[in-house]
Image (cartoon, rainbow, N blue to C red):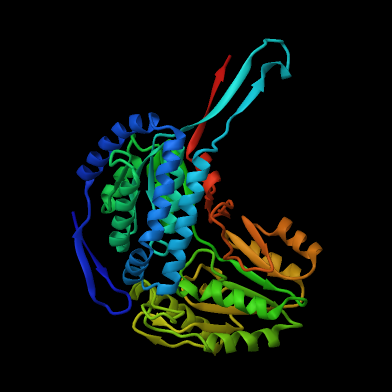
Amino acid sequence: MSDYQIINPFSGDLIEEYALAGREDVDRALALLVQGRERQAGTPAFARSDILLRLANLLLERKEELARAITEETGKTISDSRVEVDRAYNTALASAMEARNIHGEALDSDAFPPQRERVGVVLWKPLGTVLCITPFNFPINIAMHKIGPAFAAGNTILFKPGPQNKRSAELLVQLCYDAGMDESVLQMLIPDIDATSYAVAHPEVHAVNFTGGTAAANAIATRAGYKKLLFELGGNDPLIVMEDADLDAAVAAAINQRFATAGQRCTAAKRLFVHAGVYDAFARKLVAATEALKVGDPSEEDTFVGPLIHTAAADEVEQRISAAVAAGARVLAGHKREGNVLWPTVLENVPDDAALVAEETFGPVMPLRRFDDVEEVVSLVNDCAFGLQAGVFTQNLSLAKMLFNRLDVGLLAVNDGPGFRAEHFPFGGVKESGVGREGVRYAIREMSYQKTLVI
């Protein structure tokens, strides 16, 4: 077993050092979860719903403690962390409601000959044990998007949070226990790489529900074998501003959906395509709004942009900005760094093949791309390995419908940005953005199978 250090991304202070779990810890946790399947089978839907409702209320009661733990671990601003806990409450509440609402269907065998006079009753049943793996950037809400639906469906859960998130994850798991989840139903482990690979391939794990990067997903897929895989991966999401757009609303969406969380979110507005007819006016408004943002200490109430998660992440984003500038991009705002804090940066004239825009960039940088013909945007958006979400600002419904039909994405938000998410909406993309869907009701089905009784 190896040690992991949790470092405060803003101050650089050591928060905690701990030993990562090994294979024997995985075996021990899974043995307990195998026993817990019987407990889950004997727990009726209304009881699971009541537990999730209690959990939702506990999340609100402990909101400030959770938010401060998130901020200390990840550098997310305290205001963003509070919003995350509010969203986690909604996710737990939706899970509680959907636990009572898992409907099957009845089928008549005589829809086709021969006449057999049978009725098929189709029900949803839990897969068994689900390995839930979450990233650093939304440690409580993404965890709830996995634990809540998995528990509602009747599964037992092996929860692997990001190693940076140990303290907030421990608090979340304790709240789950306080709400009534048994330890044989939910176990948390932070294994090392070898033990994680071992857990992924373990025959007592029936599904892997993973949010993270494509490389890790490929490694999981290689190791997992014959089991259900649910992947929520990266994005290189476009925000399209048409000539008839409400520019103030578009600027607000761009700021909130790119620079919040220091740009470290898969649905962030990572590429801004702006029609030539409004480009100059939009750029002026965007730069003014960007320069008005408070940057720095994430624990201060009015800070909008805090640090990136660690030095390597900040280095990578800074290097991509510098490479784009060397290739001809022009800085309109930002391009400043102190420690792990990168000032929100706006660029224009970024080459289409620059890593900053050709790949997913996880940081507070916004490249503007002028266009005349929307067909050019469709081509650039679709010529990408990712296909998560997109946003367009326009009053033209026909144009919006055309983009919905032609863009290779899982969601198009009209007069909003690609960062739109509601906890009960289906969430997921196409291509390398993932497989399967989150969103509570949809996730319950992803972590269940259909079983039929013929009468």
- Above or below, comparing residue 207 to residue 398 in the picture: above
Image position of 370 (left or right of 395): left
Q: Position of residue 62 (x, y in %)?
A: 35, 61
> Can residue 283 be seen in this snapshot?
yes
Given residues 202 and 169, the one toward you in this image is 169
Given residues 432 and 305, the one toward you in this image is 305
Q: Quadrant of the C terminus?
A: top right
Q: Position of residue 304 (x, y in %)?
A: 46, 79
Q: Quadrant of residue 161?
A: bottom left
Q: Quadrant of residue 308?
A: bottom left
Q: Position of residue 175 (x, y in %)?
A: 33, 52
Q: Quadrant of residue 85?
A: bottom left
Which residue is at 34% across, 69% downward?
Answer: 68
Given residues 430 and 182, the one toward you in this image is 182
Which residue is at 45% across, 57% downward?
Answer: 88
> Can residue 221 be seen in this snapshot?
no
Which residue is at 30% across, 40% downward?
Answer: 182
Image position of 416 (left or right of 366): right
Q: Position of residue 330 (x, y in %)?
A: 57, 88
Count numbered badges in the picture: 0
